[in-house]
Image (cartoon, helix red, strand yellow):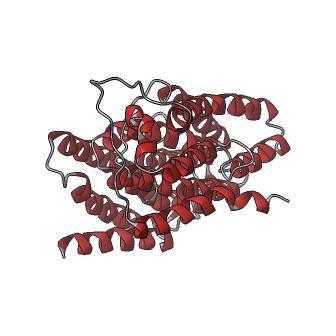
């Protein structure tokens, strides 16, 4: 019962934050959202989980302080708490830093890999997807008042550090965290020029990330070593996982390529071709570790020796497979048809 109430609070706080028109109400809803997710992070009663919950709380509290400072300063300068009246450069930049800190972008990204590593797979799913909806909605509302140069710098740094950070990771949750940082860079980089493209990118990422985490939880896969034996649990799930990883990396003609194509087109249209070129080059870093993971998943058999422990095929219930796999497959192949 208590878990259901906390989950309802998590959903309602996000909905109210996205529907609010005042910075004071948005701050209040984001605080409720933070307090609602903390019990899920610390539920396992493990020291690593408690550490993750503490880091998450401190980071989100700092971001909330910056958000309240920016909102109060803007209300003092303009006489209103209205989100669309962020005409002052200092307040709009402070608000951008606060909201990007909540989502996990460079330079305030250090908390995300540690928090995901200390959480369960389903909690990591919530942090990587649902928890980004409210801050991204607020950024979309104030996108006309964001400084373009600052947003472009944050986006390029996030795609670069997200790609480099995930290169040598053997823990899948940390790898997905750095992938999230890189994806947030793609979202922020076009926020001031084409906010709708940013929304397409973030929701495409959520559609692809949710089945990925669910498949990892269904097959108890947490490391790259587990990926090499994932075929013994479900060959169909292994194939779907490979497609999801390649799609998240942005490999054409899969779904994840569509938002990147739209963002590149917008950057070139705005005469930002050098920036578009650098962003595409940084995406190769993300593609490299996703290709490595896909190779370990589908094209590599683990070393066979008498002393190695093999994860034997487990019986998977038809209900989970019938619900999850069509969703993952649809999200992987659905959107390229929308390209004009």
Going 28% across and 63% down the picture, which residue do you hit? 36
Residue 103 coordinates in the image, percent (x, y): 45, 49
Quadrant in the picture for residue 123: bottom left
Q: Position of residue 159 (x, y in %)?
A: 59, 34
- Residue nearer the viewer, 43 or 272: 43
* Residue 314 seen by the camera: yes
- At x 72%, y 51%, the residue is 258
On screen, residue 25 versus residue 83, left or right, reads left
Q: Is residue 76 visible?
A: no
Question: Percent from the top left, x then y, of residue 204?
Answer: 61, 56
Residue 31 sits in which quadrant?
bottom left
Image quarter of the C terminus: bottom right
- Residue that appears at 33% across and 49% down: 60
Q: Quadrant of residue 270?
A: top right
Q: Quadrant of the N terminus?
A: bottom left
Question: In the depicted view, which residue is nearer to us: 96 or 120?
Answer: 120
């Amino acid at each position: 019962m208590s878990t259901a109430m906390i989950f309802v609070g998590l959903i309602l706080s996000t909905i109210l934050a996205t529907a609010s028109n005042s910075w004071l109400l948005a701050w209040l809803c984001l605080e409720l959202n933070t307090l609602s997710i903390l019990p899920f992070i610390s539920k396992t009663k493990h020291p690593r989980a408690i550490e993750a919950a503490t880091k998450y709380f401190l980071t989100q509290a700092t971001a909330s302080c910056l958000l309240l400072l920016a909102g109060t300063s803007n209300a003092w300068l303009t006489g209103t708490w209205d989100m669309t009246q962020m005409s002052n450069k200092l307040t709009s930049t402070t608000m951008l830093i606060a909201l990007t800190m909540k989502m996990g972008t460079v330079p305030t990204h250090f908390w995300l890999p540690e928090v995901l590593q200390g959480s369960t797979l389903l909690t990591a799913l919530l942090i990587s997807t649902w928890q980004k909806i409210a801050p991204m909605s607020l950024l979309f509302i104030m996108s006309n008042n964001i400084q373009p140069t600052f947003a472009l710098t944050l986006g390029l740094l996030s795609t670069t550090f997200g790609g480099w950070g995930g290169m040598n990771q053997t823990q899948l949750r940390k790898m997905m965290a750095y992938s999230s940082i890189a994806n947030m860079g793609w979202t922020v980089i076009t926020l001031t020029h084409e906010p709708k493209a940013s929304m397409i990118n973030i929701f495409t990422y959520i559609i692809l990330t949710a089945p990925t985490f669910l498949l990892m939880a269904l097959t108890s896969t947490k490391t790259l070593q587990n990926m090499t034996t994932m075929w013994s649990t479900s060959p169909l799930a292994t194939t779907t996982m490979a497609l999801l990883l390649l799609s998240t990396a942005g490999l054409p003609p899969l779904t994840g390529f569509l938002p990147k194509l739209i963002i590149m087109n917008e950057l070139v249209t705005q005469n930002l071709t050098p920036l578009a070129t650098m962003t595409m080059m940084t995406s190769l870093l993300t593609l490299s570790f996703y290709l490595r993971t896909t190779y370990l998943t589908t094209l590599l058999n683990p070393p066979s020796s008498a002393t190695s422990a093999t994860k034997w095929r487990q019986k998977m219930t038809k209900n989970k497979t019938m619900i999850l796999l069509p969703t993952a497959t649809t999200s992987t192949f659905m959107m390229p048809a929308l390209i004009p």
